[in-house]
Image (cartoon, helix red, strand yellow):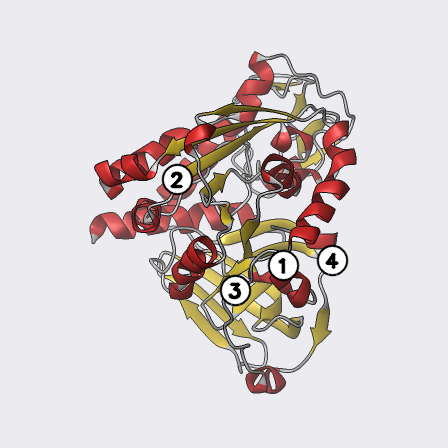
């Protein structure tokens, strides 16, 4: 879940006060309150009618509750779709801890299970088991953890197959079509006129799970989480005529393929333009890019995005990668506030992250192999783009002051992790 009610409570404090704050005691998830599920289902009706939502279901007769539901993550509409599909059955949602800020009692009554993105959380598995076995509730996870930047599937947790094997309950996947196109993360919360549907499938029964190894289960999951929304838009000729469709596109397309400059592109209206070489590209109504003059290096946005990944990978392999920026620092260590503790400096290299506050009281480092990805987000709770690092005790939300790409930081973190793991 993300941007619940689209705002988050913030408070300005100093580092000494932060040190005195205690982490809340862990509590097992409650059984979801049926009436709250009914309310969300009711509230969801207008938007789901607006997108003409429909669903295809396969093998669902084999999905006897409680189930583990794995859903791709495109936008905030995902949660509404889940309640539309599974209500009146109870649903416990694995959500990020920031969703609990200022709303802890409500989130607990909903049966939500909080966790930190891309942080090893030993209590999460026991909480999921408690929700499934004790509360007799379905558990919904967004296994990609982060929202898709380019409309394609993102990497799943390496140990997801082991979790499925341990739980031994039916596994249901929900793959949405159109949710990303309606509200892509880069587009500044502007919703487009697009139909949305979902494919709901029971992909594994308890008997099938017993027969397969964790590695085989992981392969099944990876096959299900394979999609490309821009390619589907082009193939099915889905028209998006909104004149803001390229707004914010520079968030994912941060490197110019013509002049190789970074952070010089600007997406606005229906075009993305490089201020360095003046090259411009038009995003047509079917989601394809075309240069207004000269060569069109990439007409498919995911191809441009993957090229950027390869560029980052080469920088890392050549020992050239380094990201540095001054940042504003926010900290989450309990369910009350995002605590703003002042300014600092964030550095990212092949050796990991380093965050140092201007007063030198905070000095946090993070190993490059601590997680397979990082939490990078655009316009997070309408505060700004963020790079989030941290551990079970604290999450550090870094708001860059300089013109840098949080997308590049995420790509780099993922590629550094792969390289380090391969060497190991």
Could you tell which of marks 2 and 3 lies nearer the N-terminus? 2
Disc nearer the start of the sequence (1/3): 1
Where residue 83 appears, as percent x and y from the top left, is: 63, 41
Tag 2 residue: 170
Residue wearing tag 4: 7
Q: Mark 4 vs mark 2: which is more N-terminal?
A: 4
Reading the chain from its start, which is encountered first: label 1 or label 4? 4
Q: Is residue 384 visible?
A: yes
Vertical placement of residue 416 versus 255, above or below: below
Name the residue beneath numbered marker 1.
Answer: 99
Per the image, label 3 sits on a secondary structure element best described as: strand
Q: 68 or 350: nearer the eye?
A: 68
Q: Position of residue 271 (x, y in %)?
A: 70, 27
Q: Residue at x 55, y 77 (%)?
A: 24
The residues tagged by marks 1 and 4 sit, at their Cα atoms, a distance apart of 10 Å
The residue labelled by disc 3 is: 346
């Amino acid at each position: 879940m993300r941007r619940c009610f689209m705002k988050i409570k913030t408070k300005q404090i100093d580092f000494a006060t932060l040190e005195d704050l205690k982490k809340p005691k862990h509590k097992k998830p409650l059984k979801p309150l049926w009436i709250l599920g009914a309310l969300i289902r009711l509230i969801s009706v207008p938007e789901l009618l607006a997108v003409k939502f429909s669903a295809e279901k396969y093998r669902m007769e084999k999905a006897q509750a409680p189930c583990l539901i794995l859903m791709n993550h495109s936008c905030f509409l995902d949660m509404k779709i889940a309640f539309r599909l599974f209500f009146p059955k109870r649903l416990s949602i694995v959500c990020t801890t920031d969703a609990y800020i200022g709303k802890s009692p409500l989130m607990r009554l909903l049966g939500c299970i909080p966790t930190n993105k891309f942080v090893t959380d030993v209590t999460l598995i026991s909480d999921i088991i408690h929700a499934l076995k004790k509360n007799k509730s379905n558990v919904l996870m967004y296994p990609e953890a982060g929202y898709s930047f380019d409309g394609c599937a993102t990497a799943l947790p390496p140990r997801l197959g082991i979790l499925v094997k341990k739980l031994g309950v039916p596994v249901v996947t929900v793959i949405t079509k159109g949710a990303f196109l309606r509200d892509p993360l880069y587009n500044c919360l502007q919703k487009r006129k697009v139909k949305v549907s979902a494919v709901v499938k029971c992909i594994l029964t308890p008997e099938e799970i017993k027969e397969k190894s964790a590695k085989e289960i992981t392969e099944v999951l990876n096959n299900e989480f394979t999609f490309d929304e821009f390619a589907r838009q082009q193939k099915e000729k889905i028209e998006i005529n909104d004149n803001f469709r390229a707004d914010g596109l520079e968030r994912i397309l941060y490197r110019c393929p013509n002049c190789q400059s970074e952070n010089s592109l600007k997406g606005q209206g229906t075009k993305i333009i490089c201020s360095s070489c003046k090259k411009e590209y038009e995003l047509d109504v079917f989601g394809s890019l075309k240069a207004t003059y000269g060569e069109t290096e990439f007409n498919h946005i995911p191809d441009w995005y993957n090229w950027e990944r390869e560029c980052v990978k080469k920088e890392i392999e050549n020992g050239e990668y380094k990201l540095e920026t001054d940042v504003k620092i926010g900290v989450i260590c309990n369910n009350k506030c995002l605590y703003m503790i002042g300014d600092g400096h964030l550095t990212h290299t092949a050796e990991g992250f380093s965050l140092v506050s201007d007063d030198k009281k905070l000095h946090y480092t993070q190993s490059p192999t601590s997680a397979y990805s990082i939490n990078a987000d655009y316009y997070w709770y309408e505060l700004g783009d963020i790079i989030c690092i941290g551990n079970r005790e604290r999450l550090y939300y870094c708001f860059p002051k300089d013109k840098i790409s949080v997308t590049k930081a995420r790509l780099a973190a993922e590629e550094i992790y792969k390289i380090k793991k391969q060497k190991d």
